[in-house]
Image (cartoon, helix red, strand yellow):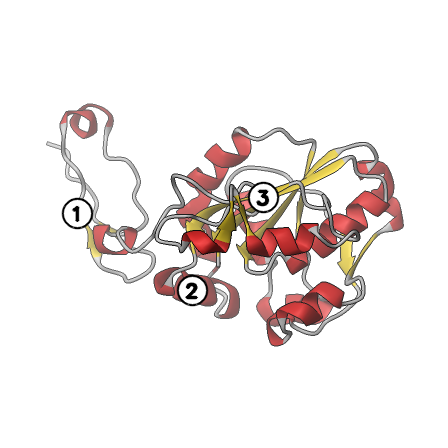
Amino acid sequence: MEIYQMDYCLYCDRPIEPDLGWYELLFGPEERLLCQKCEGKLEKIEGQTCLLCGRSREGQDSKLFKEDICYDCLRWESNPKWKGVLAKNISLYKYNSFMADFIARYKYRGDYVLAKVFSKDIQMKISSLDYDVIIPIPLSKERLYERGFNQAEALVKEAGFGVVQVLSRKHTEKQSKKSREERIHLEDIFKVKDEGRALIKGKLVLLFDDIYTTGSTLRHAARALLDSGAKKVISLTLARG
């Protein structure tokens, strides 16, 4: 008789009890990386969302939306510099308190293995999208040195996809320290490397980042890519704030 090896939750270290239905008995238990309690704290974004930024409409005041677009996106789109720059963003999870702590542990405490938790969901979503190249949002040299890895790039690679890194940062100050208006009017914070222009010319680019908050980072990156010859830019993020 086969004895199943006990797995432990990557987040809380609790034992993960295996499901032992007919499928598991015939083919073996499916690998689970989180326990049931931690899985239950993740909130997938499902149902109706803002058509541009992917903000969930569930539990939101209808006054935050005009038809199918949220007012945050309408403000971006009302500015000629930013109109149409980011064609669409898709986010997989809500940025609740559990996700906030999860990402903080992953990004700032160097717990790289946590990237594996979302690999299947990211793989399924990317496989459903139309794109030519995937570009993760880059870190500054200082941030990369502090963390030891680019959290956005790691999430994509753990999902089994290759990336091209054609962007570099001009500014190192954290965007979270700035107000929304400051982020909108900030000078360009990204540039496309000279050797990267040929890789994006006429291409449909999929930008990837861990969190969408105001959309400033993704739009600044998209602006740099479009100015350097990209045909269209869409984005995918793990969480939506």
Q: Residue at x 58, y 43 (%)?
A: 52
**In the rendering, at what x and y percent does residue 99 appear?**
40, 60
Which class describes the residues within 10 Å of circle 2: few (<14), some (14-19), or many (20+)? some
Q: Residue at x 56, y 54 (%)?
A: 71
Total numbered badges shown on the rendered structure:
3
> Which mark is in front, 1 or 2?
2
Tell me the kind of residue under disc 3.
Leu
Q: Quadrant of residue 161?
A: top right
Mark 1 or 2, nearer chain start: 1
Task: Tell me: residue 137, above or below residue 181.
Answer: above
SS state under label 2: helix
**In the rendering, at what x and y percent does residue 232 appear?**
73, 37
Q: CA distance from mark 3 to mark 1?
A: 40 Å
Question: Residue 17 got which mark?
Answer: 1
Q: Is residue 83 left or right of residue 44?
A: right
Q: Report the residue marked by disc 3.
A: 52
From the viewer's side, name the closer residue of 41 and 102.
41
- The single residue placed furthest to the left in the displayed view is 1
Location of the N terminus (image quadrant): top left
SS state under label 3: loop
